[in-house]
Image (cartoon, rainbow, N blue to C red):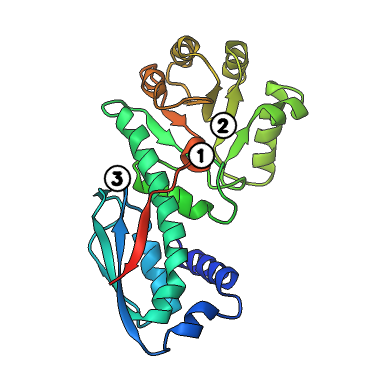
Amino acid sequence: MENRILREFILRSLAEDLGNGDHTSLACIPAETNGKAKLLIKEKGILAGISVATELFSIIDKNLKPDLILEDGTSIVPGDIAFYLTGRQQSILKSERLVLNIMQRMSGIATSTHEYATKLKGLKTKILDTRKTTPGFRFLEKEAVRIGGGLNHRMGLFDMIMLKDNHIDYAGGIDKAICKTREYLKRNNLNLKVEIEARSLEDLRTILSAGGVDRIMLDNFSIEDTRIAVKEISGRFETESSGGIDLSTIRSYAECGVDFISVGSLTHHIKSLDMSLKAF
């Protein structure tokens, strides 16, 4: 995680929350009064966001001192203390909601990812996230996926070519989409991996005939068609299953032999993990 990007995110988030001041705290808390707080875990899961929290505290007030008890990736249960925090009470209160918003969401994503990754234990298949993320928060959501045991798909539109249904239709078909893509990469001296979506076994066979890609996404394939597709691809290209796969079906898809399974719900359909920052 790049420190510059994290710092800019924190500063934007603080500006959004603080405006011209935390008037509630300014009204009733003396400026130099020190206090203590603890991050109390209230739900079972996987902890994520500790490294973000420490950077947040240093930006809000360099004299805020976190005493870290747990680290990112730790399995947590209700009653656990993730860290203690000492410093000015006004600074603790400034940080409270932002640190909770970040850590609760990141921990929810890490927990969900861990559940999916556990289903793949013993198999070669890896779990992937998608671009179905919260605008401005993507880099932290993808960090949470890594903490939970998953891998990141492309970060954005810039770091991989991904020919999906609309690209293929607009380009005039699979062959033309691949051909135009290879020409574009050569013309612009770009070294990007190329993934293409297959919507049917017929699409797959057209792609296999055309070549020129690195990975084939089997989109909304049944388990039986996935098994057939993996056999026909026979290791010539990386394979990725996607579309409507959940905890009840992910292992069956993985047992077909695909290299990756992408799950959009890791980041776009998430329940934040319950925790609180309590004064004591």
Percent position (x, y) of residue 114? 34, 39
Which of the two discs, 1 and 3, labels the residue nearer the N terminus? 3
Q: Which residue is mark 1?
A: 269
Within 10 Å of disc 1 (Cα), the crowding (few <14, some 14-19, many 20+) is: few
Which residue lies at the image location 67% right of the left edge and 34% below the top edge?
181
Left or right of 155 on screen, residue 144: left
Image coordinates for residue 189, horizontal then vertical, percent = 63, 46
Q: Foreground: 39 or 120?
A: 39
Q: Secondary structure at mark 1?
A: loop
Q: Earlier in the sequence, mark 2 or mark 1?
A: 2
Residue marked by disc 2 = 195
Query: Does residue 183 appear to the left or right of 275 in the view shown?
Result: right
User: What is the residue that sits farthest to the front in this orientation?
Assistant: 28
Secondary structure under the numbered disc 3 in the rendered image? loop
The amino acid type found where label 2 is placed reads Glu
Q: Residue at x 39, y 49 (%)?
A: 273
Instruction: Tell me, yes or no, if residue 60 can be seen here.
Output: yes
Residue named by callout 3:
44
Q: Secondary structure at mark 2?
A: strand
Residue type, numbered disc 3: Lys
Looking at the image, which is closer to me, 93 or 179?
93
Is 15 situated above or below 258?
below
As drawn, the label of residue 112 is none
Taking the spot 38% from the left edge, 45% from the top edge, the residue there is: 110
C-alpha span from label 1 to label 3: 18 Å
